[in-house]
Amino acid sequence: MMLSERTWLFLLSLAIAVILWFYVDTTAQSPSGQSPTASLRLHNVEVSFSGLADGWRASANPPAVDVEMRWPAPAILAVRPADVRAIADVHALETGPHQVTLRIQVPAGVTTVQATPPSVVVTLLGP
């Protein structure tokens, strides 16, 4: 059975597409064999507080930070800005100003997290 020229061109195009897809898939991986990573920098992530006793108030300077994240590229749609939090733990602090290193809460699978700045000045006011 003879194939028409149109069928041959279609099959040739399909073969080229599959070869290119495999080529791009294998060359897009990092040298360590891991899948490529996606990165995202969120600006103005508001600082929240954990361990704040009833009746106490806290303020942070600066009140918001930038957060840079990296994760495997296939999971790019799983990361939402609402899932990222910058948390200052104040449970053991007395009234007054304190330099507090932030804990960044991110979705599962995020591999690298960096806050800028990494710490803030938290001022606590008692009841």
Image: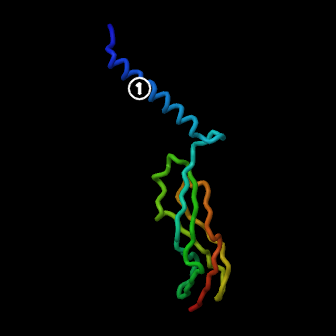
Q: Residue furthest right?
A: 99
The quarter in which the N terminus is drawn is: top left
The quarter in which the C terminus is drawn is: bottom right
Q: Residue furthest top?
A: 1
Residue drawn at 47 percent across, 53 percent down: 78
Taking 20 as reference, is 8 above or below it?
Answer: above
Residue drawn at 59 percent across, 89 percent down: 125
Q: Where is residue 31 shown, x and y percent of the image?
A: 65, 40
Residue of label 1: 14
The front one of 28 and 78 is: 28
Q: Where is residue 103 shown, x and y percent of the image?
A: 61, 68
Inspect the image, locate mark 1, and give the three-letter code of the amino acid beneath it: Leu
Residue 9: name its quadrant: top left
**Circle 1 SS class:** helix
Taking 77 as reference, is 16 above or below it?
Answer: above
Residue 62: name its quadrant: bottom right
